[in-house]
Amino acid sequence: MKILNLTLISLLAVSLAACKKEGKAAGSSKDSLALKKDSVVVPEFHKELYGIYTGEFEGNITEYDKEGNDYEEYSTKKISLKINKITKDSVYGQSIVGGSQRPFRGIFNEGSNSFILDEPGNDKTDGRFEVKLNNDSLTGNWNAFNKSAVKSPLKTLKLIKKEFVYNPNFMLDENSDLVDWTNPKSVTEKYTDEETGKTETYKASKNRFASDAIFKINASKQKLTEKELKNLRKLDLEIIKNAVFARHGYSFKKETYRNFFERTDWYIPVSNNVDKDLTPMEKENVVLLNRFIQYAQDKYDSFGR
């Protein structure tokens, strides 16, 4: 009887082990099928169109004077559209303009050689790009989804395909305007008539301006010293610092810096955060520049436009 019981126990153990092994194998098969399903590669098309298209983003914006009267003013910015992926049904990419980086999804029409690209719509500045491809250029319009929430609900685009390249040698052109036109300072001036000796006061608008140091100091190529920076103007320091970020394709929120760098041939906005791309020396220089910016003074003068 003992022998029979042992035999039955042995058979039961073998049977359980076989079932466990069979179940594991079935589970593995199921897992592998799920994995295979999840890893299906979606075919991509027109990879030759992938890349960065950059250029002018233009339109009229509505402004208001002190009395509340509205008027239109022409506005232009530099924008980049990055096309990352094209499938049979969809186009994926990003728009980068004015410090904002938004994903888009849309379609490519082979017949008309055109794109319709929609930003998500969960931000008041989102809209739709309708652009036509002609060789390496994109031209068309952008329409805001929420037309009452933005100053310029309709803008035109004229873009050309460019390859972004980081180059530490990039500098502002020596013919660049040195004036910050976006932050005028209102001051009270005095005028004395030589004949009558009567003195009158009047309001004048002055703008800060940089020195030619911005054409000589490169924070991407040289380790900066306190001696080099201590006598520079605040705007000098800001431009030298932000040239580092411009070389890495940072999309500036502040109009002051956009006005300086968007006039160059080399500046291409590709991201709203390039901190991780800075070299160790650039990071050290930025820290030093920030320290001097905190206490530096600006130079102001009156300019005509």
Image: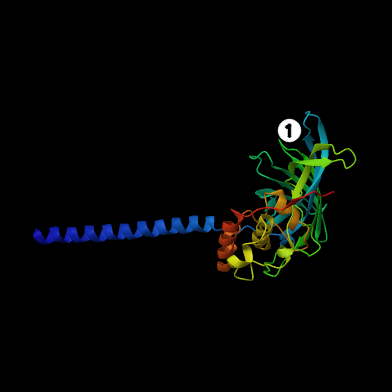
Q: Which residue lies furthest to the right in this view?
A: 195
* Residue shown at the point (65%, 53%) measured from the top left: 297
100 or 212: which is nearer to us? 212
Point out residue 72 in the picture as x, y percentages from the top left corner: 83, 37
Q: Can residue 163 be seen in this view?
A: no
241 or 44: which is nearer to us? 241
Point out residue 7 in the picture as x, y percentages from the top left corner: 16, 61
> Dot 1, how many residues are within 10 Å of its Cα: few (below 14), some (14-19), or many (20+)?
few
Tell me: residue 132, above or below residue 240: above
Looking at the picture, which amino acid does disc 1 mark? Ser
46 or 124: which is nearer to us? 124
Residue linked to disc 1: 148
Point out residue 220 in the picture as x, y percentages from the top left corner: 64, 67
Q: In this view, does 284 lie to the left or right of 92?
A: left
Q: Is residue 119 visible?
A: yes
Q: Is mark 1 on a helix, strand or loop?
A: loop
How many numbered circles does the render carry? 1
What is the basis of the colouring in this image?
Answer: rainbow
* Residue shown at the point (69%, 41%) measured from the top left: 125
* Residue shown at the point (65%, 43%) measured from the top left: 120
Point out residue 303 in the picture as x, y percentages from the top left corner: 82, 50
18 or 257: which is nearer to us? 257
* Quarter occupied by residue 243: bottom right
Q: Is residue 274 left or right of residue 157?
A: left
* Image quarter of the N terminus: bottom left
* Quarter occupied by residue 9: bottom left
